Amino acid sequence: MQGALAAHSGADFEVELEQDFRDRGVRVIATRDWNESEAYHNPALRAVITDAPYEIIYGGRAHIEFLLILGNRQILIEAKRQESSGSVDEKLPYVFANARHNWPAREYVFVMDGDGWREGAETWIRARDAETEGFTVLRREQFPAWLDAILAR
C-alpha cells in the first residue's frame, strides 16, 4: 500500500513540474511523440521530453522524468519526492553516478521534494552538487526560479 501511495505522490510531483514548464511556454512532448531529428533542425527549440530515454551506468538505457532541450543544450531532470521514510534516499549515489555518466553531453538536475529524506541524505547530495560541474540539486520550491533563469539565457 505504501509503495502505491509513493508512486502516486511521485506522479503528482512530475505533473507539477510539467506545469512549471508549460507556464513558461516550454513545449511538453511525450517520448512516443518525440522526433529527435527535430532538435537538429530547430536550433531555437525549447521543449521538454517526458519519460525520456537516457544511458545509465550499467551500459543500457532507462527513462528519466524529463529531458529539457534548449537549442543545443540538453539537461536531464530527475524528480523524487520522499514524504516519509523509505528507500528513495538510498538511490542518491545511483542518481549521482548516472549524472556523471552522461556528462558532458547532458547536464543533470535533481529536484527533490518532501520531508521524509533520511538524515544526511540531502547534505550528501548537495555536497556532490557543490563539487561537480554539470550537476545541480534543487528543492521543489527552487525549481521555478531555476527554470526562469535557465530560460532567460
Image (cartoon, rainbow, N blue to C red):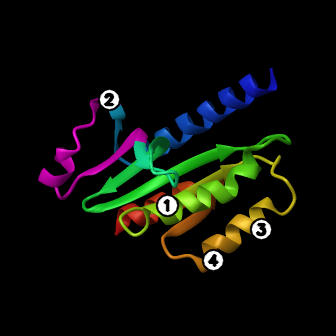
Q: Identify the residue shown where x is 61% and y is 71%.
A: 129
**Residue at x 37%, y 61% (from the top left corner):** 151
Circle 1 packing at 10 Å, graded few (<14), some (14-19), many (20+), is many
Q: Earlier in the sequence, mark 4 or mark 1?
A: 1
Residue 32's mark? 2
Tell me the SS state at disc 1: strand
Q: Badge 3: few (under 14), some or many (20 or more) residues near its Cα, within 10 Å?
A: few
Q: Amino acid at mark 1?
A: Tyr
Q: Earlier in the sequence, mark 4 or mark 2?
A: 2
Q: Is residue 99 above or below residue 87?
A: below
Question: Which quadrant does the N terminus fall into?
Answer: top right
Type of the residue with mark 2: Arg
| Quarter assignment of residue 123 | bottom right
Residue matched to label 3: 123
Q: CA distance from mark 1 to mark 2?
A: 22 Å
Residue type at mark 4: give it.
Ala
Q: Earlier in the sequence, mark 4 or mark 3?
A: 3
- Relative placement, left or right, of 81 versus 99 is right
Extreme residue toward the top, this view: 1
> Would you say residue 51 sits in the magenta stretch?
yes
Residues drawn in magenta: 32-52
Q: State the image quarter where residue 2 is shown.
A: top right
Residue at image point 48% right, 70% down: 134
- The label shown at residue 108 is 1
* Earlier sequence position, callout 1 versus callout 2: 2
Helix, strand or loop under label 2: helix
Q: Quadrant of residue 121?
A: bottom right
Give yes or no for residue 143 being in the magenta stretch: no
Q: Looking at the image, which residue sits at the far bottom?
A: 131
> What is the spatial separation of the Cα atoms under label 4 and label 1, in whole angstroms?
13 Å
Q: Is residue 57 left or right of residue 67?
A: right
Read off the residue under disc 4.
Answer: 130
